Image: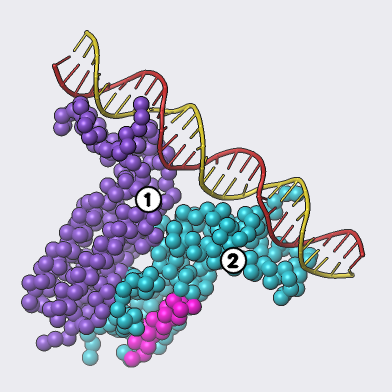
Chain colours: A purple, B cyan, C yellow, D red
Amino acid sequence: MTRRSSKRQVPRGSKRPGKPGGVRDTNRKARKAALIDAALLLYLDHGVSNVAVDDITTKAGVAKGSFYRYFEDQEALVEELIAPARRTLTSALITARDMLEDAVTAERQIEAYRGIGEALGSLLLESPGPARLYLQECRAPAVGTRKPIGALAKRVIDLAEEVSTVAQKHGLLKPLPVPVTARAVVGAAERLFLGVLLDEEMGNVLEIPLALVTLVVDGLRARTA
Amino acid sequence: MTRRSSKRQVPRGSKRPGKPGGVRDTNRKARKAALIDAALLLYLDHGVSNVAVDDITTKAGVAKGSFYRYFEDQEALVEELIAPARRTLTSALITARDMLEDAVTAERQIEAYRGIGEALGSLLLESPGPARLYLQECRAPAVGTRKPIGALAKRVIDLAEEVSTVAQKHGLLKPLPVPVTARAVVGAAERLFLGVLLDEEMGNVLEIPLALVTLVVDGLRARTA
DNA sequence: CTTTTTGATGACCGTCTGGTCATGATTTGG
DNA sequence: CCAAATCATGACCAGACGGTCATCAAAAAG
C-alpha cells in the first residue's frame, strides 16, 4: 500500500466516509480535537519548537500513526489550531477599518477602536489558548511549525496599518507615520492581553480596554477642534 | 581523564592560563566571540530552539568539542550573548526610575522617559543583534535555551512597573493600574524597535522616540494643570 | 452476514543531536 | 629546551525524533 501523495481529513474519492454525525465522522472530529488540545497545552508550556509528535500523541492518548492520518506534520496542526484566532482577529480589524472609513466624528472613531477591543476581548474568552499561543510566539522567527503564526502576525500588522491609514486620512490621528502608530498600538495591545492570559498581576483587568483607548485616542489623537 | 563537574572559561586552579593579552587569552576570546556571533546569526533566522551545536560550530569554523570548552550548553551561550543587552536595559530603567523619584516637573518626567528611549536607541545601535534576538524571543516560553531571555523579560517588566509606580506616585500618570501602563509602554516600545531592527517599512524612524513619548506623556499622562 | 473500505496501532528505520573522549598540537613557564 | 598544562579535534555513542508501514480492528454499504 502506497502513501497517498496528499493527505486529507477525508481522502478525496473516499468511498465510505460514513454519514455526517455517524461513528466515523464523530470519531474523526474527536480525535482531531484531542490532538489539537494536547498540542496546544504542550506548545503553551514548552514553545512550538520543543514539542515532538510523540509528546502530542501520548498526551492525546492516540497512537503515533494516527497523528499522520489527520495532519501532514505539526505545521498543519498549528495552522488548524490558530484558525479561530485568525478569523476573529482579521475580521475585527477589517470591520474596524470599514467603520473608520465612515467615521466622521470622534465618537464613531472611538466606536471603531472599541470594536477591535471587544473582538479581542471575546477572542480571549472564547479561545484563550490559541490567543495566548499566538501572543507568545508571534514575534519569533516564522520557520517550521511556527510559520502559520508568523503569517498571521504579518497579516495583523498589515491590517493595523490599514486601520491607521484610514484613521489618519480622516484627520483622526497625529501625523505620525502609519507604520509607527500601527505597531505602537498592536505592541501595547498584545503585551496587555498576554499579561491577562498569563494571569500576571494586572490590577482590574476591566480597565485594560480603557487603557488601550486612552493610548490610541488620547495619545495618538490629533489635536483638532 | 574524567570530565570536570563544572566547566569554566578558565578552569579554577588553572596553572598556566597564559597572561592577559597572551596567545591563549587572545585565542580564547576570539573563539568565544566567533561562537557567539555564529549562534546569534543562526538564532535570529531560525529561533533559539531550532539551532544545533553542530550548526554553531560549523558556522564558527571550530570543532564541536571546542564548543564545550567554552560553554556548558547553549543556554550558557545565550546567557552570555544577551549580557550587554541586559546591562543596558536594566541600567536604563533603573536610572529612569531614580530620575523620576526626583522629577517634580513635567519636564523632568519627560527627561526620564527620554533617557529610556535614548538608552534603548543606543542599545539598538551598539548591539542590534542581541537586541533583536531579545525582542523576537522574549515572550515565548522561557524553557531550555530561551531561559536567560525569559528571565530578562521578567526583569524588564518588573522595572517598568517600578518606573510606573514612581511616575504615578508623583501624580504624573493617570490613575490606571501600574501593571497596565507598564505593559502598554513596554509592548509598544518593543514592537516599534523590533520593526526598526527587522527593516520593516517604518517611515522616518527618527519619529519613533517621539511616538513613544507621545504615547506615554500624552496618552497616559494625568490631566493636571 | 459478507465484502470493501477506512482507521488504529506501535515497531521499525534512517537521520539528527547532545555530549564525551583519546589523541595530537600548541602554549606556558622555568 | 623541556615537561607540564591547556587547547583542538572529529569520530563515536546513545537516545531522540519524524515519518512509514504491515497487520489487525472497526465501520460502512448492500
Picture coordinates of residue A157, whole percent (x, y): 26, 66
| Marks 1/2 same chain | no
Q: Is residue A186 left or right of residue A170?
A: right
**How far is the residue under mark 1 from the one under mark 2?**
29 Å
Relative height, residue A73 to residue A187 (above, below)? above
Looking at the picture, tell me which residue is in the foreground, A60 or A204: A60
Residue type marked 1: Thr
Looking at the picture, tell me which residue is in the foreground, B38 or A116: B38
What secondary structure prevails in the magenta region?
helix
* Other residues around mark 1 within 10 Å, as few (<14) / some (14–19) / many (≥20): some
Chain identifier of the residue bearing label 1 in the image: A
Picture coordinates of residue A12, whole percent (x, y): 22, 34
Relative height, residue B23 to residue A34 (above, below)? below
Chain identifier of the residue bearing label 2 in the image: B
Picture coordinates of residue B79, whole percent (x, y): 53, 64
Q: Is residue A184 visible?
A: no
Quadrant of the snapshot with the C terminus of chain A? bottom left
Instruction: Give the extent of the magenta segment.
Output: B107-126
Looking at the picture, tell me which residue is in the foreground, B217 or B200: B200
Q: Judge whether residue B212 is colored magenta.
A: no
